[in-house]
Image (cartoon, helix red, strand yellow):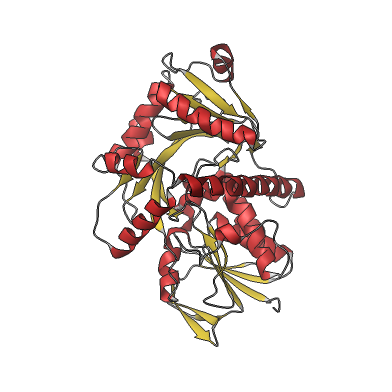
Amino acid sequence: MTTPNKVSIIGGGIQGLCTAYYLNKQGLEVCVFEPKTAETGASYVNAGYLTPSHIIPLAAPGMIRKGLKWMLNSSSPFYVKPRIDKAFIKWSWRFYKSSTLQKVNAAIPVIKEINLLSEQCFKEIKLSGDLGDFQLDHHGLLMLYKTKAAGEAENEVAKKAANLGLQVSYPNQIELNSLQPQLSKDILGGILYDCDSHTTPTEIMPKLKKKLLDSGVKFITEKVCRFELQNNKLTAIVTDKNNYPTEEVVIAAGAWSGQLAKQLNIDLSLEAGKGYRIDVKRETGIKIPAILMEAKVAVTPMKGFTRFAGTMELSGINTNIRKERVNAIVKAAEAYYPSLKITAAEKEAAASGMRPVSPDGLPYIGRSKALKNLCFATGHAMMGWSLGPATGKLVSEIILNKKPSMDLAPFNPDRKF
């Protein structure tokens, strides 16, 4: 296949910008279609983790049972809003079929491999100096638990991670208090994934966009309305204002990717998984990233502030802020860190982002057989930030007809569930 000169990327989040970064470095003409709301999306409000330790996909045994248990509790960590919608029902059935031990075990080494690839890409980007300096701290990720059940469950994950060669340690209470002073005394224990790192998304995203603009990448803030096709190829992107000829298209539009795929008669099964964040821009005493296990709340000491993020809300594509979910994050944070008090103003400034969630928890990376010049880079669920650079690198390799850095079969957009 001939390498295209002009590539159009739909989506200005971490997947789209990283794809533009790698393609631009190879001398291709790149245009990013980015809605004006992109800077309030999931790529800006996530926990900033690089997580090789997150080897278990969302579609795992027991998640359906938990989802049903929490369905009527809008402040639960995993909230599903009941609704009669054909696409949601189809997605739910596929999620159910994917939640088997066999499929999870097959996904674990794949998730590990792409996370390690992405972590290496982050390091290479930092070393290149292309974005200047930015936070990329390797302090690990602490899993804190208050109940025996949560501890036992995470211990099983930790064993799998260690067997895959990932660095895991088990701090005792003295070591735990040294890693993070002033924890609640009712915390039973913690597991430290030494293999993980963290960043500040609101620092990296603007720097990445500036680098692309300075390198000649064009950004178009017009709404993509439809596509023009000829001979099984996309020939132009039509917005609400203009018509843009193209040679290659990458759909990296996050939770909106499924809607764009539907216009092309492609069944890309996605649900929007809303997450929330609260930023505390003052000293909190929090030194190390942690996940508060019972509440599924992520805590990250970022550059200039501490971020508390979490929850998975399947309620369709919307920007509504549910106060009960914000309050659940606050309650968990203050219960694990007793000296912390989150103010009303900090709660009021909470934001949300829409994660694109595939039925099996694996992203869609690669070409669809439906069209010759279309690639997808979406469906990363809660690993979107962590996998951004790897996804961009892989998509660029596809477009440039290079051998991919890893096997792309598990991420096939046309895979069956």
Q: Is residue 407 left or right of residue 349?
A: right
Quarter placement of the N terminus: bottom right
Q: Position of residue 185 (x, y in %)?
A: 43, 13
Q: Nearer the viewer, residue 305 or 235?
A: 235
Picture layout, residue 221 above or below residue 101? below
- Taking the view exactly as shown, the residue that stands out farthest to the bottom is 231
At x 43%, y 59%, the residue is 255
At x 49%, y 19%, the residue is 189
Picture layout, residue 143 above or below residue 390? above
Q: Nearer the viewer, residue 259 or 363?
A: 363
At x 43%, y 27%, the residue is 150
Q: Is residue 403 left or right of residue 6?
A: right
Q: Position of residue 92 (x, y in %)?
A: 35, 55
Which quadrant of the figure has residue 159?
A: top right
Q: Is residue 173 left or right of residue 80?
A: right
At x 43%, y 76%, the residue is 265
**Whether residue 366 can be seen here:** yes
Q: Position of residue 200 (x, y in %)?
A: 57, 41
Q: Position of residue 206 (x, y in %)?
A: 58, 52
- Taking the view exactly as shown, the residue that stands out farthest to the front is 102
**Whether residue 317 can be seen here:** no
Picture layout, residue 312 above or below residue 30? above
Quarter placement of the C terminus: bottom left
Q: Nearer the viewer, residue 135 or 59?
A: 59
